[in-house]
C-alpha cells in the first residue's frame, strides 16, 4: 500500500472574546474563561489582549503569583496548556480594572497517516484500510463514511473496525469513496477523501442439459462477466480441441452414460476465475435381439442381447399384433402364444429408467410343421408278456418312452418289462424345415405278473416217504395248472390250487405251476426236489435155531457204499451171529441222504424148547395205559420198536430193565394206537403188543 502523509498547517491567532461587563471592575476568578486553541504538533499560540494598549497596561502571571510574571505586554506566546491570570490596569482612574482567569487549552490537530488498499481483483474478502493517523483520542475522534462516485452518501456499506484497521466489504468490481473525518473538540473537522474498490472478478456459472447418449450436450454459460473484456477457455476431458465460446455451446460426449470433468477459466482484464464442473449424458440402451428357430407349434424365444441397460430397463415388443413387455435383466423372453407359419416384422423399444430409449425392428420367419399320429398301442398290457408293433404316420420319426425299441424309421416295438400306470408313449417327427411335431398316447395299465409262491414241497425226499400237499397262493382254481416232471419227463398234469406229490420213485423232480390272473396276465413258477432211493437190504423171514447153536444172519443183498448197518442186538455191519431166538431188526442208513430202511428176521426155537427156557407173561395185551411184563429171571435192555424199525422212547428212556423179581411195568398211555414189537435180550423172538 502506498502511504500518504497529509499535513495541515494552521497558523491560528485566536482573539479572546470577553463579555462586556458594565461593572466598574471585573473579576473572572470565579467565572473562568475557557479558551481553546487548535495547533499542529510543536506550534505556539499568541494570545493578544483586546483592550486598548494606550489606556491599559497588562500583566500576565501564572497562578496569581505576582512574582511569576509572564509578560507586561499586551500579547503572550503560549506553548502548552496553562492557567493564566491577566490583569488589565487602567492608566487613569476612570477606567475599570480587569482581572481575568483564563484556562488555556491547546488541542493538537491530527496528523494523517493512511494506508488505503490498492484496487485489485475481487477476492471475496473485505478491503483492509489501515489508519495510522496520530491524534489525541481524549479530545479527537475518528469516523468513517462512504459515498458513491457521484458523491451520494452510502449508509449501508458493511464494515468492521479492529484496532487501527477498517475491514470494508465492497462488492465485486465496485468502487466507493471513503471519507475519514477527524473531529477535534473546539476545532474545525479535518476530512480526507479517497477511492477504494475492486476490479471485477468473473463469477462462473456453467451448467449443462441432460441428454441421452448420441445427442449433443448443450453447455449453458450463465456466468457474470464482460464478454467484451474477457477471454474464455473451456477444457472438457476426452474432447479435442478446447472451446473458447463466450456464450452457450454444444459438445458431444462420445461414450454412453459417462461423467466428464469440464475445466473453465475466464480472464477479464487480468482478473482470472477458474472452476470445474461435471457434465454427463444419460445411459442410452442399445436394443439387440436374436431369435431361436421357431415352428408354428412352438412359442417363439427371443434372446435379449441388449447393452447399456439397467435392472429396471423395460423392453416392449410388437409381434404379430401382440404387444408384450419384459425386464431387460432377463436374458430371454418367450412369447406367450404360438404363431402361425409365415414371415413377420417385430418391433422393439428398450427404455431405461432414466427415460432414454432405443428402437429396433427385425423380420422373423415361423416355419411350418408336419403333423403326425401313430397306431398300434393298446390301453392295457401285462409285463414281460404282451408287446406291440407301433407304426407312425410318416416314414421317419422316433418313438420314445419306457419299453420302446425303435426298429426302423417310423416303427418301434413296445414290450413292457415291469408294471406301471399311465405310461406316456411319444412319437416325434422332424420335417425338412427342422420343425418337429410329436404326439403321445397313454397306456393306462401295465399289469404285473402274478407273484406265485409254491408251498409244501421239501427240498429232498426219501423213497416211499409220505406224500406232500402243494399249494399255490392264488384265488382262481380254474386258472392254476400244475405239471410234474421226473428226470425232465412230464409224468402228470392237473389243474387246481392243490397238488399231491407222492415220492414213490427215486429221481429228480420239477413241479411247475402256471397261473393266469384276472387281468389275463400269467406267470410260472417251478420248484425242484430230489427223491433219494432207500438202501437195499433183505433178510430171510424165519430161521430155526437149535438150542446151544449159533447161526450167522446177514443182508442177502450186496453192501452199498456210504450205507451204515445196525442190528437191534447192537451189532454193527450187514451181518450178526445169533444164539437166541427172537425178532431181529436190521437198519440200513445212507450217510449222505439220511434215508433209512429196516427189515426183520425171526429166529425160533422149537415151541417146546422155548417154553422150557422161559416163562413169559405180558398182560393186559392189548392195553390202553399200562402193560405188565413178568419174566422168570431179571432182564436188562428191553426195547420197544415200531413195525418200521424206529425205536420207541417212553418218558425219555428207550431201554428198560425189570426188577430183581423179573417184573416190569411200562406206562404206554402216550403212545399212538397200533402194533409194536417188544424185544427181550436172550429171548431171540419178538413179542407183539397192541396198544
Image: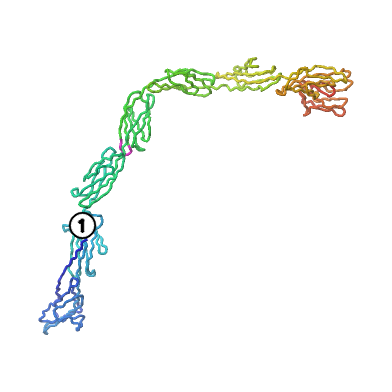
The local crowd at label 1, few if under 14, some if 14 to 19, many if 20 or more residues have their Cα within 10 Å, is some
Whole-percent x, y for residue 249 in the image: 23, 42
Whole-percent x, y for residue 624 in the image: 79, 24
Q: Residue furthest bottom?
A: 93
Can residue 689 be seen here? The reply is no
Can residue 363 be seen here? The reply is yes
Q: Residue at x 16, y 74 (%)?
A: 45
Q: Nearer the viewer, residue 538 or 205?
A: 538
Whether residue 355 is in magenta: the answer is yes
Whole-percent x, y for residue 224 in the image: 22, 49
Q: Nearer the viewer, residue 424 or 587?
A: 587
Instruction: Name the main secondary structure of what is drawn in magenta.
Output: loop
Q: Nearer the viewer, residue 510 or 379?
A: 510
Badge 1 marks a residue whose secondary structure is loop
**Which region of the structure is painted magenta?**
352-357
Left or right, residue 304 beside residue 77: right
Q: Residue at x 33, y 26 (%)?
A: 364
Whole-percent x, y for residue 273 in the image: 24, 51
Quadrant the C terminus occupies: top right
Is 138 placed above or below 386 here? below
Quadrant the N terminus occupies: bottom left
Left or right, residue 408 beside residue 92: right
Disc 1: which residue: 119
- Please identify the quarter of the rendering in which residue 580 is found: top right
Whether residue 168 is in magenta: the answer is no
Query: How many labels, in total?
Result: 1
- Please identify the quarter of the rendering in which residue 72 is found: bottom left
Amino acid at each position: 500500500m502506498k502511504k500518504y502523509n497529509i499535513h495541515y498547517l494552521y497558523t491560528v491567532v485566536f482573539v479572546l472574546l470577553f463579555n462586556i461587563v458594565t461593572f466598574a471592575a471585573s473579576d473572572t476568578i470565579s467565572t473562568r474563561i475557557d479558551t481553546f486553541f487548535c495547533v499542529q504538533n510543536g506550534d505556539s499560540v499568541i494570545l493578544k489582549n483586546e483592550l486598548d494598549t494606550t489606556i491599559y497596561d497588562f500583566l500576565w502571571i501564572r497562578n496569581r503569583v505576582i512574582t511569576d510574571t509572564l509578560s507586561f505586554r499586551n500579547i503572550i506566546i503560549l506553548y502548552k496548556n496553562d492557567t493564566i491570570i491577566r490583569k488589565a490596569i487602567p492608566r487613569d482612574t476612570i477606567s475599570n480594572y480587569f482581572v481575568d482567569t483564563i484556562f488555556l487549552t491547546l488541542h493538537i490537530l491530527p496528523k494523517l497517516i493512511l494506508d488505503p488498499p490498492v484496487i485489485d481483483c475481487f477476492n471475496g474478502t473485505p478491503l483492509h484500510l489501515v489508519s495510522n493517523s496520530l491524534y489525541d483520542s481524549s479530545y479527537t475522534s475518528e469516523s468513517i463514511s462512504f459515498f458513491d462516485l457521484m458523491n451520494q452518501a452510502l449508509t449501508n456499506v458493511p464494515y468492521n473496525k479492529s484496532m487501527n484497521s477498517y475491514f470494508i466489504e465492497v462488492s465485486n468490481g465496485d468502487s466507493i469513496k471513503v471519507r475519514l473525518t477527524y473531529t477535534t473538540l473546539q476545532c474545525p473537522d479535518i476530512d480526507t477523501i479517497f477511492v477504494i474498490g475492486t476490479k471485477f472478478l468473473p463469477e462462473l456459472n456453467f451448467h449443462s442439459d441432460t441428454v441421452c447418449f448420441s445427442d449433443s450436450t448443450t453447455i449453458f454459460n450463465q456466468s457474470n462477466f464482460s464478454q467484451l473484456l474477457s477471454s474464455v477457455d473451456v477444457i472438457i476431458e476426452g474432447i479435442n480441441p478446447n472451446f473458447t465460446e463466450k456464450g452457450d455451446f454444444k459438445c458431444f460426449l462420445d461414450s454412453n452414460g459417462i461423467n466428464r470433468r469440464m475445466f473453465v477459466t475466464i480472464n477479464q482484464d487480468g482478473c482470472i476465475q477458474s472452476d470445474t464442473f461435471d457434465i454427463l449424458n444419460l445411459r442410452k440402451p442399445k436394443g439387440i435381439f436374436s431369435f431361436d428357430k421357431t415352428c408354428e407349434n412352438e412359442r417363439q424365444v427371443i434372446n435379449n442381447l441388449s447393452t447399456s441397460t439397467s435392472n429396471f430397463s423395460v423392453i416392449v415388443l410388437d409381434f404379430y399384433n401382440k404387444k408384450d413387455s419384459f425386464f431387460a435383466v432377463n436374458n430371454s423372453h418367450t412369447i406367450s402364444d404360438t404363431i402361425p407359419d409365415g414371415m413377420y416384422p417385430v418391433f422393439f423399444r428398450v427404455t431405461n429408467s432414466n427415460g432414454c430409449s432405443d428402437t429396433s425392428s427385425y423380420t422373423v420367419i415361423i416355419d411350418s410343421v408336419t403333423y403326425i399320429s401313430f397306431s398300434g398301442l393298446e390301453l392295457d398290457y401285462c409285463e414281460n408278456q404282451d408287446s406291440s408293433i407301433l407304426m407312425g404316420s410318416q416314414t421317419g420319426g422316433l418313438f420314445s418312452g419306457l419299453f420302446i425299441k425303435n426298429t426302423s424309421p417310423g416303427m418301434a416295438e413296445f414290450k413292457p418289462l415291469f408294471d406301471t400306470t399311465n405310461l406316456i408313449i411319444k412319437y416325434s417327427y422332424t420335417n425338412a424345415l427342422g420343425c418337429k411335431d410329436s404326439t403321445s398316447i397313454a397306456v393306462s395299465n401295465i399289469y404285473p405278473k402274478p407273484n406265485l409262491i409254491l408251498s409244501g414241497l421239501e427240498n429232498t425226499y426219501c423213497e416211499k416217504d409220505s406224500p406232500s400237499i402243494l399249494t399255490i397262493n392264488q384265488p382262481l382254481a380254474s386258472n392254476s395248472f400244475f405239471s410234474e416232471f421226473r428226470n425232465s419227463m412230464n409224468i402228470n398234469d392237473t389243474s387246481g390250487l392243490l397238488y399231491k406229490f407222492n415220492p414213490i420213485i427215486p429221481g429228480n423232480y420239477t413241479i411247475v405251476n402256471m397261473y393266469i390272473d384276472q387281468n389275463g396276465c400269467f406267470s410260472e413258477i417251478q420248484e425242484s426236489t430230489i427223491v433219494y432211493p432207500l438202501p437195499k437190504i433183505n433178510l430171510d423171514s424165519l430161521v430155526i435155531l437149535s438150542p446151544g447153536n449159533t447161526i450167522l444172519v446177514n443182508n442177502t443183498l450186496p453192501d452199498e457204499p456210504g450205507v451204515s448197518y445196525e442190528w437191534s442186538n447192537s451189532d454193527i455191519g450187514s451181518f450178526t451171529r445169533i444164539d437166541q431166538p427172537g425178532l431181529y431188526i436190521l437198519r440200513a442208513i445212507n450217510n449222505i441222504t439220511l434215508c433209512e430202511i429196516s427189515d426183520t428176521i425171526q429166529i425160533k426155537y422149537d415151541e417146546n424148547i422155548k417154553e422150557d427156557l422161559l416163562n413169559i407173561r405180558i398182560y393186559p395185551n392189548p392195553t390202553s395205559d399200562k402193560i405188565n411184563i413178568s419174566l422168570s429171571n431179571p432182564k436188562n435192555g428191553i426195547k420197544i420198536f415200531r413195525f418200521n424199525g424206529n425205536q420207541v422212547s417212553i418218558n425219555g428212556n428207550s431201554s428198560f430193565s425189570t426188577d430183581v423179581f423179573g417184573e416190569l411195568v411200562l406206562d404206554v398211555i402216550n403212545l399212538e394206537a397200533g402194533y409194536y414189537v417188544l424185544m427181550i435180550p436172550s429171548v431171540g423172538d419178538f413179542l407183539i403188543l397192541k396198544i
